Amino acid sequence: MVTKDPRASGGFSLRERLTAALLGGGLDDTALVTGLYRRARVQAAPTRVGQIRMLVTKPFEYGRKWAGFVRAHGSALEAQFGAGRVRQFVALYRSWLSGAAHPDPFAAYWAFAGRRARRKWGAWLGPVQSHVLLGDLALRRAPDLARSIGDKRRFPAWALEHGLPIEPLLAVFEDGAPRIGSAEACAAALPHIDLFAKPADYWSGYGAKRWLAGSAGHWTDQEGRAVTSREIVAALMEQSRERPIVLQRCLRPHPSMKFLTPGAVSTIRVVTYQDVPG
């Protein structure tokens, strides 16, 4: 049963179903799952203009990505599946149209060798799709909890409340300014340590930036340039005009774990489920 508040109930309104059907290209289970994934991605754009731009540009973007994939792997695909490059591109691009598949070898295998006895078995649920769909499901079933966990501005307070160790926030930037205090005060308060910034409401490292502490009063950015605290704050203020930004200490991997990573901290991702009454 669909109630008037689908996000509180976990149900889907008629409008949401129609939107998912339009974005997924059909009314069956596969199309609706694909449409819900695409709907969540579009809604992640911070502005209406950004959402429209995404709808217009994504078909061309993925056409370009699949063309590059065929150029790089066409010979191997032809040897394995007996398909020429034109057929490869058509089949692979169709896999994006019908299932939002990303250009990688797993999607290629799915596009050429997957046996789909029934249409609804053809859904493509890779890590990105699963992450987005689980986030949308969590927001429907437990919106307050989902926002506390999913918003990096709110998560530190939630983690401390529940006894979890957390790297504290050094600053938050929203709408082109620090959330607390002036730009000058924020720059003056920055500790001379490695710094890491990222959008508060995005995922997969998009928009992340790092500065390594160098000589007194200076840091080295990702392009190898020496910058001051004022320049760091100015860059984050400008970036926050599109999305809210959080700034934290940049962590380094433990010496015994360095063989697992080229420099970034290795993580383990765990999906948990909470029974929500009602």
Image (cartoon, helix red, strand yellow):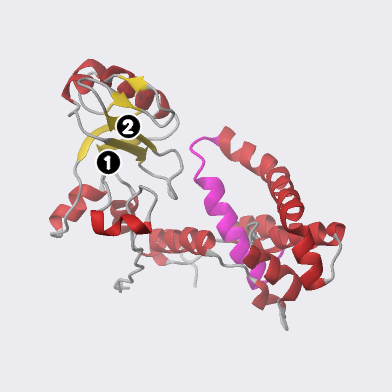
31 part of magenta stretch: yes
Q: Position of residue 175 (x, y in %)?
A: 37, 27
Q: Quadrant of the C terminus?
A: bottom left
**Residue highlighted by disc 2:** 211
Magenta stretch secondary structure, dominant = helix
63 part of magenta stretch: no
Which label number is shown at residue 250?
Answer: 1
Q: Residues within 10 Å of mark 2 (few under 14, many from 20)?
A: many
Is residue 5 visible in the rendered structure shown here? no
Judged left or right of residue 71, residue 84 is right
Q: Which stretch is magenta?
A: 25-48
Q: CA distance from mark 2 to mark 1?
A: 8 Å
Amino acid identity at mark 1:
Cys
Task: Say whether marks 2 and 1 touch (CB < 8 Å).
Answer: yes
Secondary structure at numbered mark 1: loop
Q: Is residue 90 above or below residue 54?
A: below
Q: Position of residue 47 (x, y in %)?
A: 51, 35
Q: Residue at x 34, y 52 (%)?
A: 150
Quarter of the figure with residue 73:
bottom right
Q: Is residue 101 above or below residue 176?
A: below
Q: Residue at x 31, y 30 (%)?
A: 173
Return the residue nearer the eye: 14 or 239: 239
Q: Residue at x 68, y 40 (%)?
A: 57
Amino acid identity at mark 2:
Trp
The furthest residue to the bottom: 117
Secondary structure at numbered mark 2: strand
